[in-house]
């Protein structure tokens, strides 16, 4: 597609439930990143994929968070046993090679997750 | 590890006035530097980036920024702002190796008054 697509755009879930957030990167982009943006804050890094593998997952806050990218394209961020503190906008970005390439990152519009 | 400090959480200015949004960073390695803009209810859009070369970087919408290595700063400037520049602005840094993940500042809310 023309840009990075994230679905759903909004998700409201009850505390304790499981959620999945989807990211469709730009076709051909090998690098994919997930970030989390809490209200009034800058985005914070969660995880980075190069192809199918998670090259850096140091930003995942705990073991309730998991992400996959099985075919090196679409990625799913999975959150188990959601807590109210998980409420945030989850941003996905993709890049052709890496950040320092001339094309840089392209961000999606994000998924706003609200845990009630 | 890198960190970014945006010194002003809010900056109000009048239309057609100049503006400077300040950004300082810390890092023990060579970095790339970025400014992103986020309009209400929209995703992040790249304004400009410094990778190497000239320390004065020009971006979209008339914005520019200057990389100052000795002061570890990357301040964003525009000589004359418009109402449409009202948005949240984020400075970000990344190391030049490895995952090249972005570390963002807290953001500066730029409000343009008529």
Image (cartoon, coloured by chain):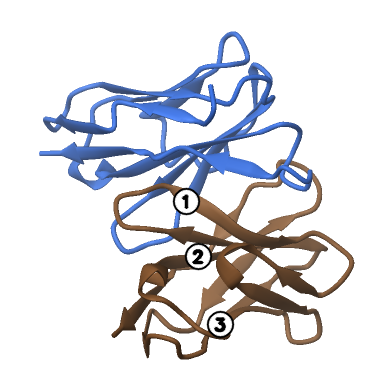
In the image, residue A88 above or below residue B63: above
Going by the image, does A39 lie left or right of A45? left
Tag on residue B22?
A: 3
Q: Secondary structure at mark 1?
A: strand
- Residue shown at the point (29%, 85%) measured from the top left: B114
- Tell which circle, 2 or 1, labels the residue nearer the N-terminal end: 1
Answer left or right for A57 relative to B32: left
Image colour for chain A is blue
Q: Give the numbered dot on residue B44.
A: 1
Which residue is tagged 2? B90
Query: Chain letter of disc 2?
Result: B
- Quote the CA–CA distance across marks 2 and 1: 9 Å
Residue reaching furthest top? A71
Q: Secondary structure at mark 2?
A: strand
Chain under label 3? B
Q: In terms of image quadrants, where is residue A8?
A: top left
Residue B94 lies in quadrant: bottom right
Chain in brown, by letter, is B
Pick the residue in front: B65 or A46.
B65
Q: Position of residue B99 (x, y in %)?
A: 71, 41
Residues packed near mark 2 inside 10 Å, few (<14), some (14 to 19) or many (20 plus): many
Q: Tell me whether the residue at label 3 lies in contact with that at label 1, contact meaning CB atoms closer than 8 angstroms.
A: no
N-terminal-most mark, 2 or 3: 3
- Of the residues under marks 3 and 1, which one precedes in the sequence? 3
């Amino acid at each position: 597609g023309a840009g990075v697509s994230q679905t759903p755009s909004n998700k409201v879930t009850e505390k304790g439930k499981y959620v999945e957030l989807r990211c469709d990167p730009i076709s051909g982009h090998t690098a994919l990143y997930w970030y989390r943006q809490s209200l009034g804050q800058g985005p914070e890094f969660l995880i980075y994929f190069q192809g199918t593998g998670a090259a850096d997952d140091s930003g995942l806050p705990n073991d309730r968070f998991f992400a996959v990218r099985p075919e090196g394209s679409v990625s799913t961020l999975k959150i188990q046993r959601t807590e109210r503190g998980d409420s945030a906008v989850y941003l996905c970005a993709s890049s052709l090679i890496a950040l320092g390439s001339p094309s840089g990152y392209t961000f999606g519009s994000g998924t706003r997750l609200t845990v009630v | 590890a890198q960190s970014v400090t945006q010194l002003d959480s809010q900056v109000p200015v009048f239309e057609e006035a100049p503006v400077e949004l300040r950004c300082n960073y810390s890092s023990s390695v060579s970095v790339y530097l970025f400014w992103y803009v986020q309009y209400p209810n929209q995703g992040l859009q790249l304004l400009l980036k410094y990778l190497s070369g000239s320390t004065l970087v020009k971006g979209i919408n008339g914005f520019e920024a200057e990389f100052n290595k000795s002061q570890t700063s990357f301040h964003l400037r525009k000589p004359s702002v418009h109402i449409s520049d009202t948005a949240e602005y984020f400075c970000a840094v990344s190391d030049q190796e490895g995952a090249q993940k972005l570390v963002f500042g807290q953001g500066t809310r730029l409000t343009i008054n008529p």
